[in-house]
Image (cartoon, grey):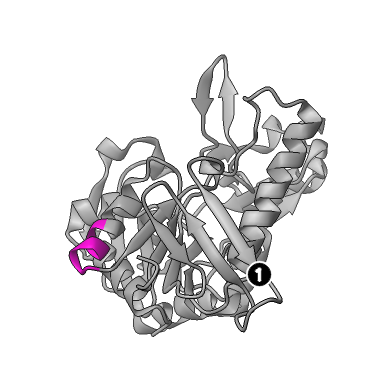
């Protein structure tokens, strides 16, 4: 495999979305090397050389079954990698933090140094695009319609905003894994009233947004120059609460809206992303947010849209169309 140009797929052990893309790549005879940073050790070896050969970075990434020559990587599909924490294995807390940092900056830094292959998407660019306040400002600059929103830790300003806009929802600024009584919980979009707020708002910034009187939600997946839009019908404020209650339809977006979504990704140097939009009762589209690496596999299953093939096309070419 070292003489061929492989696609690197970097993701966690169980990832149905990555599996679908890998199946497409296998069908086309494109070599794939899949690994997760948490496999470091006997499950994953990296050796990289700098300043000793014509290439800026040379070496290999090896798994027990595959080897990738870093000078010949075709593309990198950066899905949902898990960085090791070394919490198990007998290391002290300080040593575990040290080891985790060495993996992130050693393995991660080596991969980030590869400027030849196409990245879908480069993790540093994904990180820059993952801040909701920055997303909101970028969307408005590009002409997308953004619901009135405030990010604040001032309870008085939050109350004024809610009073001014009537129906308002609270949304998390960043998802984090949370357990209560041993049960995983998720931060859904929730309605909020001014009377509910107290001084605990001061602890951290909160995002409050005027509620769109929506007729439907739309999830838009952009892959290179291809755009897939799926209408999601439900009576839920946050459709993620109950997938069994959803209906799906393929949507044709207005050309200008499609161009603005592509411009949004280009602004951040991304080649793919999942947008959440809302359509109001008058048929107007409202921009809600971008997930630079959002889930889409279930939408392909529900609609038959060839999303995994689009990813395989992009990764096979190894260049932005």
Which residue position holds label 1? 137
Secondary structure at numbered mark 1? helix
In percent of the image, x 59 and y 59: which residue is there? 47
Dot 1 alpha-carbon crowd within 10 angstroms: few under 14, some 14 to 19, many 20 or more: few
- On screen, 157 above or below 191? below
Q: Position of residue 202 (x, y in %)?
A: 82, 38
In percent of the image, x 62 and y 47: which residue is there? 174
27 sits to left or right of 211 = left
Q: Position of residue 218 (x, y in %)?
A: 36, 60
253 sits to left or right of 159 = left
Q: Position of residue 178 (x, y in %)?
A: 59, 29
Query: The magenta stretch spans which residues?
Result: 23-29
Which SS does the magenta portion mostly show? helix
**Is 277 covered by the magenta stretch?**
no
84 sits to left or right of 253 = right
| Farthest front residue in view | 52
33 sits to left or right of 176 = left
- Quadrant showing the N terminus: bottom left
- On screen, 79 above or below 114? above
Q: Quadrant of residue 254?
A: bottom left
Query: From this viewpoint, is residue 289 visible?
Result: no
Q: Nearer the viewer, residue 43 or 246?
A: 43
Q: Nearer the viewer, residue 69 or 303?
A: 69
Q: Position of residue 19 (x, y in %)?
A: 30, 51
**Is 26 covered by the magenta stretch?**
yes
In percent of the image, x 54 and y 50: which residue is there? 45
């Amino acid at each position: 495999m070292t003489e061929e140009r492989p696609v690197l797929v970097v993701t966690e052990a169980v990832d149905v979305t990555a599996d679908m893309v890998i199946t497409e790549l296998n069908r086309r005879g494109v070599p794939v090397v899949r690994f997760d940073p948490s496999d470091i050790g006997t499950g994953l070896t990296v050796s990289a050389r700098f300043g000793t050969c014509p290439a800026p970075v040379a070496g290999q990434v090896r798994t027990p079954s595959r080897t990738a020559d870093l000078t010949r990587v075709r593309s990198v599909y950066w899905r949902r990698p898990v960085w090791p924490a070394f919490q198990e294995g007998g290391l002290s807390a300080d040593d575990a933090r040290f080891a985790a940092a060495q993996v992130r900056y050693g393995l991660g830094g080596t991969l980030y140094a590869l400027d030849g292959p196409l990245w879908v998407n480069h993790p540093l660019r994904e990180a820059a695009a993952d801040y909701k306040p920055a997303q909101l400002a970028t969307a408005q600059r590009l002409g997308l319609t953004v619901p009135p929103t405030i990010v604040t830790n001032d309870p008085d300003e939050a109350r004024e905003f809610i009073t001014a806009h009537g129906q308002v929802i609270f949304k998390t600024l960043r998802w984090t894994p949370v357990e209560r009584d041993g049960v995983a919980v998720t931060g859904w979009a929730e309605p909020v009233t001014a009377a509910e707020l107290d001084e605990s708002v001061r602890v951290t910034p909160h995002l409050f947004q005027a509620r769109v009187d929506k007729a439907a939600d739309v999830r838009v997946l952009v892959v290179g120059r291809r755009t897939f839009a799926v209408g999601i019908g439900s009576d839920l404020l946050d459709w993620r609460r109950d997938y069994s209650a959803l209906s799906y339809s393929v949507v044709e977006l207005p050309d200008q809206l499609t161009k603005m979504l592509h411009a949004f990704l280009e602004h951040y140097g991304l080649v793919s992303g999942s947008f959440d939009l809302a359509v109001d009762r008058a048929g107007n589209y409202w921009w809600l947010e971008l997930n630079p690496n959002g889930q889409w596999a279930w939408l392909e299953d529900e609609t038959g849209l060839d999303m995994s093939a689009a990813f395989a096309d992009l990764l096979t070419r190894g260049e932005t169309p």
